[in-house]
Image (spheres, grey):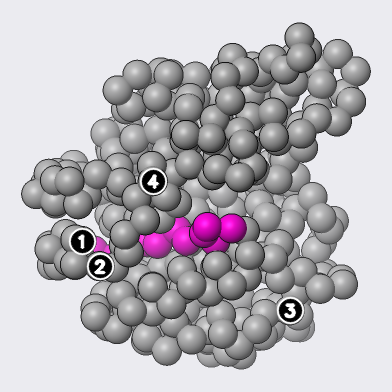
């Protein structure tokens, strides 16, 4: 069984997508684009631009946004005006003409690539999409799983409403909950997400018995130390709920750990994984797909170390589809493991990574443990 542990379906990104208004949604997208590593270019002549056009680099909250007429530009792009010139950033692959990705498109891509299941994640860039994802799952109940989410910056203000929203999402048929830490900081919420203000919320979510997914990014700056601080908070959360299946989405911020033609992963990254229920997603291509080239041999040493350190039964492949296709094909993300890691790690480890671990997590019925 092949399971893509991290994919997306979303309506056109120029719409409100569950936010109170189109403007509020696009403000959030603009703030994320200002930090994103994709290049900026001037449409008239492809001259390079600068992310500082979108937001003040010294203020990573929504308050730092600049008024530049930010809007969807079609074909996977967002566009805006600075100095009388139109600039663009290619966030999605160009074939997404209206910046949407339907469940039917994803399932067709899965069929072509040989993927049995995909787990639908979400992010506020795509929107507040619990109901949309539930509809995707209803249309494809034997191919798609999906995660609930909510405005993380509002939890302390109304924890009862937050608890009710997660319960509602599960009632719609969703399969787990995803917590995106950065959204709290974007709104100026600096209280620890493992602090007393969220204790009742976490107790409730844990009691519902479904897997939890945590999206951590460095804060307040894009540094190793700031990321390790987030991992320490997660480690504290794991100590409080040691038996809850908890997945670190995307993996680590791989770009921070590049060293020469490979990755150097310091031991401190693995401290949180002393918790036996912690798992790690492996989304290398969405981060490094424009740094190295297929077949990404530079990744193989890190993959082998992760297998040796954590065991393949705690690792799961994911892609970030369709976003990853701005760099490489869906099939190439899979074959990095199924073809090009053969001989570097055991066949049983490959089976775990590309499906077995996720199948066991969600009880899909074909996740018998093999390998490490």
**Element marked by disc 4:** loop
**Pointer 2: what residue?**
195
Q: Position of residue 341 (x, y in %)?
A: 73, 74
Q: Nearer the viewer, mark 2 or mark 4?
A: 4
Q: Earlier in the sequence, mark 3 or mark 1?
A: 1
Q: Are marks 2 and 1 in contact (CB under 8 Å)?
A: yes
Q: Is residue 350 visible?
A: yes
Give the vertical position of 194 relative to 126 (above or below): below
**Pointer 3: what residue?**
264
What's the magenta bit mostly, secondary-structure-wise?
A: loop
Q: Which residues make up the magenta segment?
A: 209-221
Mark 2–mark 3 Cα distance, whole angstroms, equals 32 Å
**Pointer 1: what residue?**
198
Magenta includes 212?
Answer: yes
Q: Nearer the viewer, mark 1 or mark 4?
A: 4
**Element marked by disc 3:** loop
Give the vertical position of 135 relative to 231 (above or below): above
- Badge 1 density bin: few <14, some 14–19, many ≥20, Cα 10 Å: some
Camera-side residue: 208 or 233? 233
Q: Position of residue 44 (x, y in %)?
A: 86, 13
Q: Are marks 3 and 1 in contact (CB under 8 Å)?
A: no
Mark 2–mark 1 Cα distance, whole angstroms, equals 6 Å
Tell me the tag on residue 32: none
Q: Earlier in the sequence, mark 1 or mark 4?
A: 4
Q: Position of residue 253 (x, y in %)?
A: 61, 63
Image point (29%, 83%), residue name: 239
Q: Is residue 348 visible?
A: no
Q: Is residue 364 left or right of residue 349?
A: left
Identify the image quadrant of residue 43. Answer: top right
Image point (72%, 17%), residue name: 82
Q: Position of residue 260 (x, y in %)?
A: 87, 72
Q: Nearer the viewer, mark 3 or mark 1?
A: 1
């Amino acid at each position: 069984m092949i399971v893509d542990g991290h994919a997306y379906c979303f309506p056109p990104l120029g719409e409100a997508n569950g936010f109170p208004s189109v403007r509020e949604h696009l403000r959030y997208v603009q703030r994320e684009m200002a930090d994103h590593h994709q290049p900026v270019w001037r449409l008239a002549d492809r001259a390079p631009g600068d992310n500082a056009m979108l937001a003040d680099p010294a203020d990573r909250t929504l308050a730092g946004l600049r008024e530049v007429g930010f809007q969807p530009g079609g074909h996977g792009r967002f566009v805006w005006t600075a100095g009388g010139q139109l600039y663009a950033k290619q966030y999605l692959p160009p074939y997404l003409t209206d910046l949407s990705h339907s469940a039917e498109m994803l399932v067709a891509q899965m069929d072509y690539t040989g993927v049995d299941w995909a787990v639908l994640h979400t992010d506020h860039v795509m929107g507040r999409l619990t109901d949309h994802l539930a509809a995707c799952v209803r249309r494809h109940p034997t191919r798609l799983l999906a995660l609930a989410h909510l405005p993380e910056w509002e939890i302390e203000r109304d924890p009862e409403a937050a608890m009710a929203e997660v319960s509602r999402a599960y009632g719609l048929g969703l399969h787990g909950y995803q917590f995106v830490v950065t959204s709290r900081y974007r709104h100026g919420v600096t209280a620890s997400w493992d602090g007393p203000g969220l204790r009742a919320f976490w107790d409730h979510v844990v009691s519902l018995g479904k897997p939890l997914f945590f999206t951590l990014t460095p804060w307040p700056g894009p540094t190793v130390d700031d990321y390790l601080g987030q991992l320490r908070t997660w480690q504290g959360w794991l100590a409080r709920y040691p038996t809850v299946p908890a997945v670190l989405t995307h993996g680590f911020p791989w770009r921070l750990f590049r060293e020469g033609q490979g990755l150097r992963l310091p031991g401190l990254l693995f401290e949180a994984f002393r918790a036996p229920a912690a798992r790690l997603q492996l989304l290398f291509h969405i981060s490094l797909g424009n740094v190295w080239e297929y077949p990404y041999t530079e990744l193989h040493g890190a993959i082998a170390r992760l297998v040796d350190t954590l065991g393949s039964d705690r690792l799961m492949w994911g892609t970030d589809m369709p976003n990853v296709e701005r760099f490489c094909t869906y099939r190439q993300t899979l074959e990095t493991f199924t073809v090009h890691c053969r001989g570097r790690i055991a066949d049983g480890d490959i089976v775990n990574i590309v499906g077995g671990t996720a199948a066991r997590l969600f009880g899909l019925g074909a996740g018998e443990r093999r390998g490490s």
